[in-house]
């Protein structure tokens, strides 16, 4: 079984070129990519969820 690629929050922030504070504001409005909180408290984002979010952003901008 192949596990999906999981990105750490700093990796996501770097890719979308956004500060942590701006990201959390966007998340509070329900506009951010889906995040997963691991049992140890760390946050991850599936590569597929981030790619889907990019697609939605592109469609909304068109």
Image (cartoon, rainbow, N blue to C red):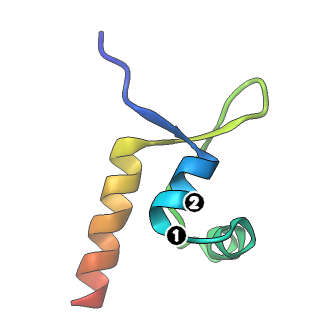
Relative to residue 13, is residue 2 depicted above or below? above
Q: Secondary structure at mark 1?
A: loop
Above or below: residue 41 compared with residue 20: above
Position of residue 50 in the picture relative to residue 33 (left or right): left
Residue at (64%, 68%) from the top-left corner?
A: 27
Answer left or right for 34 relative to 60. right
Residue in the picture at 68% in, 29% down: 38
Quadrant in which the N terminus is drawn: top left
Question: Front-most of 21 and 48?
Answer: 21
Where, by quadrant of the figure, is residue 47 drawn? top left
Is disc 1 surrounded by few (<14), some (14 to 19) or many (20+) residues within 10 Å? few
From the viewer's side, name the closer residue of 57 and 8: 8
Identified at 39% across, 31% down, the residue is 5
Disc 2 target residue: 13
Q: Is label 2 in contact with label 1 (beta carbons under 8 Å)?
A: yes
Is 40 placed left or right of 62 in the picture? right
Residue 37, placed above or below residue 10:
above
The circle on residue 45 is none
Position above or below: 17 against 59: above
- Position in image of residue 40 (x %, y %): 78, 24
42 with respect to 11 (left or right): right
SS at mark 2 in the image: helix
* Whole-percent x, y for residue 23 in the image: 64, 69
Return the x and y of residue 4 as percentages of the image width and height. Answer: 37, 28
C-alpha gap between disc 2 and disc 1:
6 Å
Quarter of the figure with residue 25: bottom right
Q: Residue at the top extreme?
A: 1
Residue located farthest toward the bottom when viewing the structure as drawn:
62
At which x and y percent is residue 12? Answer: 52, 54
- Quadrant showing the C terminus: bottom left
Res. 17 mark:
1
């Amino acid at each position: 079984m192949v596990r999906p690629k999981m990105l750490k929050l700093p990796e996501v922030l770097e890719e979308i070129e956004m500060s942590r504070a701006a990201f959390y504001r966007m998340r509070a409005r329900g506009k951010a990519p889906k995040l997963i909180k691991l049992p140890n408290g760390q946050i991850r984002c599936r590569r597929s969820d981030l790619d889907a979010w990019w697609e939605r952003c592109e469609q909304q901008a068109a």
